[in-house]
Image (cartoon, rainbow, N blue to C red):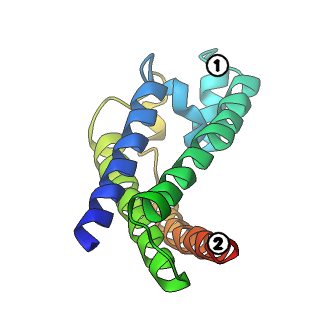
Amino acid sequence: MLLQVILEGLGLGALLVLVCAIGIRKGAVGMVHFYSDKVQQRCIELRLTTKERIRRKAIVLKIVCLPIYIAYAWLCVYTLNGASGFLTVFWQCFVILSVMNLIDRLGIDEYWVGHTKAWVIPGTEDLMPYISKADKQKKWLFGTVGMAVISLILAAIGLLR
């Protein structure tokens, strides 16, 4: 069962990578809402985007993608795996979401953003690295805690079914 849950996490990670690839298909400025305020401001100054467009894309991502990621974990755990019981649901959700978090932290942030040119926005190179050490630490902490909290909530909701 653990292998299956890990594979489901890889599937969710692949979905995240797909969302990012679509987001930067016309250039990394398409996902500038993930960058620091300094990079966003420079993009606005360079007329590559507007504050409103950045805000709108961030909201769309939260409204569309986050529920899809949560629904994916929910469907895998309850429908595919037939899990029941608080602890079983919690650990399966936590593994799925944690695998996605690892893909985000290591595959996307560390490698794709940090070591390729795909996420470079022309005119902002002096602001690199785009993800500072402090930002990485926050992402690790809040990503891990966030996945645990979401897993707890999904497991608690499962008790109400």
**Residue that numbered label 2 is attached to:** 153
Circle 1 Cα neighbour tier, 10 Å, few/some/many (<14 / 14–19 / ≥20): some
Look at the picture and state if 36 lies above or below 51.
below
Lateral position of residue 137 relative to residue 17, left or right:
right
Q: Is residue 49 visible?
A: yes
Residue 118: % across, % down: 34, 29
Circle 2 Cα neighbour tier, 10 Å, few/some/many (<14 / 14–19 / ≥20): some
Look at the picture and state if 123 lies above or below 14.
above
Residue 149: % across, % down: 60, 73
Task: Work out whether mark 2 precedes mark 1 in sequence or the reverse, and give the earlier one.
Answer: 1
The type of residue carrying mark 1 is: Thr
- Residue at 58 percent across and 75 percent down: it is 155
In what quadrant of the picture does the N terminus appear? bottom left
Disc 2 to disc 1, how far (Cα)?
37 Å
The secondary structure type at the circle numbered 2 is helix
From the viewer's side, name the closer residue of 48 and 104.
104
Look at the picture and state if 152 lies above or below 97.
below
Residue 67: % across, % down: 62, 48
Q: Are marks 2 and 1 in contact (CB under 8 Å)?
A: no
Query: Which residue ends up furthest to the right in the rendered image?
Result: 52
- Residue at 52 percent across and 25 percent down: it is 29
From the viewer's side, name the closer residue of 120 and 61.
61
Look at the picture and state if 13 lies above or below 18.
below
Lateral position of residue 138 relative to residue 100, left or right:
right
In what quadrant of the picture does the C terminus appear? bottom right
**Residue that numbered label 1 is attached to:** 49
- Residue at 39 percent across and 70 percent down: it is 95
From the viewer's side, name the closer residue of 71 and 130.
71
Residue 52: % across, % down: 76, 25
The type of residue carrying mark 2 is: Ile
Comparing labels 2 and 1, the label whose residue is closer to the camera: 2
Query: Which residue ends up furthest to the left in the rendered image?
Result: 3
